[in-house]
Image (cartoon, helix red, strand yellow):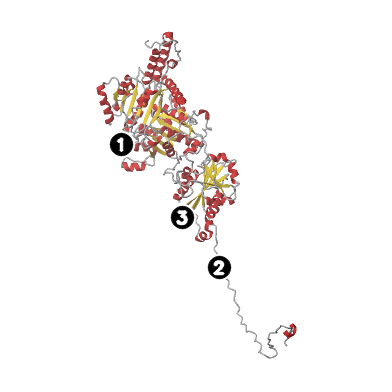
Amino acid sequence: MSDFESSHGNGPGFTAPAILNLAAGGLEPLAAPRVRSARLAALAPRTISLALKRPKVKTFSHAFSGAGASVFFQPADKKGTKPGAASSSGNKKESGSPDQYTRIKPPRDIVKLEDRLFYVLQPPLESWMAGAQMDFPFKPFPYQFEGIAFMYPRYACLLADEMGLGKTMQTITAIRLLLRSAELKQVLLICPKPLVNNWQREFATWAPEIPILAIEGDQTKRRWQWQLSDMPVKIANYELLIRDRDVITEPSMEFDLVVLDEAQRIKNKSGTTSQIVRSIKRKRSWALTGTPVENRAEDLVGIFEFLAPGYLCPQMKPRQMGQLAGEFVLRRTKDKVLTDLPPKMYRDAHIELTPEQRESYRMAEEDGIVRLEKMGKEITIQHVFELVLRLKQICNFDPPTGESAKLERMAADLEEVAASGKKAIIFSQWVDTILELSKRLKQYKPLEYHGKIPHKDRPGILDRFKADPTRNVLLLSYGAGGVGLNLQFSEYVFLFDRWWNPALEDQAINRAHRIGAAGPVTVTRFLATNTIEERIDQILTEKRELFDTILNSSEPPTRNLGLSKAEVFGLFKLKCPAGAIDPSK
Amino acid sequence: MGASGSHGATALGFLTAVEHEQGVFGGYLILNAAGRPLEFHCTAPVKANRPQQILYGPTLEPYLYGEVIGQALLEKGVAKPVIVCTDREAMLAVRPLASMAVVQVWAPPEQADGKQLRIDGPHSVQPPARFFNLGRNRLATAAGHAEDRKLLDGKLAELIEGFDLNEPFARIREAIREAQQVS
């Protein structure tokens, strides 16, 4: 019995397994297994490390001065804002957030990166003007913003927009921005004598905060004016330059900007005016003209002798000249910016009477009022009308001398109209005025259309005006030319003297502005300042504004907005006599 | 055009990047409250190498635009704007490294004119939901920095409401183009 059996007992049902007692002599014990050992070497994996170094960043930095401030400017005075005036954004609700952005682009002749970045990084003009609280009587058109952006960075430029597109406004606004950012301190503006007052008025309209000085008076006074250093803008006329040549060409006399209006005046570079203008010490040179090339390509060379001497030469071919000049010249025509323009563009030409006219006017008015007052109850509206008409005639032409401030101004405009090949119609309420104008404007070979022209001749006159390119001017009376004519090929309308009733004026203007008009019509209305014409205009304007305000209508008024009897008497502060007026007296 | 002027007044920062075959150009413009430029900083082109492109994977853009370019530019600024705007979502990654608020300005896609509508997906002209309105601007704060919105709703609200915050980015892009031409 095996040990196993003995330990576990051999009870009933238990069958002990068969056990072999190896030790007792059965099988031989197993030999211990043979172990063969192999030492494994520890293999270090090969590693490659990639250093993720932070890339080195090279930077370039430019610092600019903050919003520049000229010593001439104070924060915008809101009292000067006209009711309904627009901010440059045109939308008071979204201040500084216009829908269009006009950016200043540096011209090619600015090569230094820092200088180019200065212009590129400026805010859009619309935001800049809104932020600077620059108010405008009305929102500038998009093409005008582009013109301002063109002029602002340029040290030499020629703005050659067609007449009536607002070269004056664009120039004044560009000057305004440059003065505000302290890039200019002294500006000299040179223009024809009849336009000096116009520029003063335009500055008052578009940049009322800029002090302006018109150089005028005797020699001593002018010398003192030239030497004033705290006047940012001085206006002088071309004729004055010749007389004050010695003063303005002194080494100490320097301007940051010289602007030439009607720059075709200096197209002849050997002329005295051109020589004087070119000798004025200046940093920037701007020229304005609607007709940079009047007759020959050399005209442009003459202007460029002021802008960038030696840049153009007469021997150049026109194409080459155009390519070179392109960087300096901006010209838009009305048909190109048509979508931006209203169909009728009004501009009021406020004219200062010549000294002779002023004296005649003063004497006639004083004399006339005295006579009217002496009439007492005998006075009728007809008497007052007669005085009004007499004074209006003096505003046109001075009876003794024939002087006419209006004609001087209109002649400057007609020069451009004729040079550009466009047509102009001129209205007057008097045939005598038309005859005088015809004589004084004979270089334009004007045609006449009025009551004294036989009816059978009238159609031929109109045909000739339309077809003949050398006939640029048509003189019409309101009576004969105001109704029923189709003159839609005329782009310029001049109202030499104005009618009592705006509705009749509108009819006259609509001879040119009607279906089939080639383009927008520019209407120039002449007004002699501080005269009866201005007083009449004020009353008519108030009446029209009242009509529009009440009825919220931009349509022409259906009722007569002429002057009432009381208003006519009120022109001379006369009392309207009580009782019915007998119109036959 | 002289040295940088006074920085005591409120300044706004604008940060963006322009892709080019040479790499990514970063641009940073600091404006005064009137929108006039005070400082401009730009980078030379920055390009991730191939290992970085592989290993960073989807985090490459935030890393490159935000941490590398954005941080380098913000550090260069002398004037410290109260807020920095960016038109690139990836540049919001600079926020943890910046001492001022950084927000993204939503810029509608150029071809969208407000009249494009899709019937098979979200209208492309609408900003994602994370953007909130402030005046005419749509803004979004960086993830984890919702407190920046309080700054916008507070003292900056009046300043920013009337400001088109997308407009300065066009200036930066044009300035980078000028710098590229010179170099």
Q: Is residue A481 visible?
A: yes
Dot 2 or dot 1: first in sequence order is 2
Position of residue A452 measured from the top left corner of the image (x, y, whole percent): 28, 19
Position of residue B130 measured from the top left corner of the image (x, y, whole percent): 55, 48
- Give the label on residue A296, or none: 1
Q: In which chain is the residue bearing label 1?
A: A
Query: Residue A383 sits in which quadrant?
Result: top left
Check disc 2 and give the amino acid type: Thr
Q: Secondary structure at mark 2?
A: loop
Left or right placement of residue A453 versus residue A213 in this view:
left
Are discs 2 and 1 located on one and the same chain? yes
Q: Is residue A74 above or below residue B32?
A: above
Q: Is residue A503 above or below residue A248?
A: above
What residue occupies the far front of the structure in this picture? A12
In space, the residues marked 1 and 3 are separated at their CA atoms by 50 Å
Q: Is residue A559 above or below residue A254?
A: above
According to the picture, the residue beneath numbered tag 3 turns out to be B22
According to the picture, the residue beneath numbered tag 2 turns out to be A47
Q: Is residue B33 visible?
A: no
> Dots 1 and 3: beta carbons under 8 Å?
no
Position of residue A371 measured from the top left corner of the image (x, y, whole percent): 41, 10
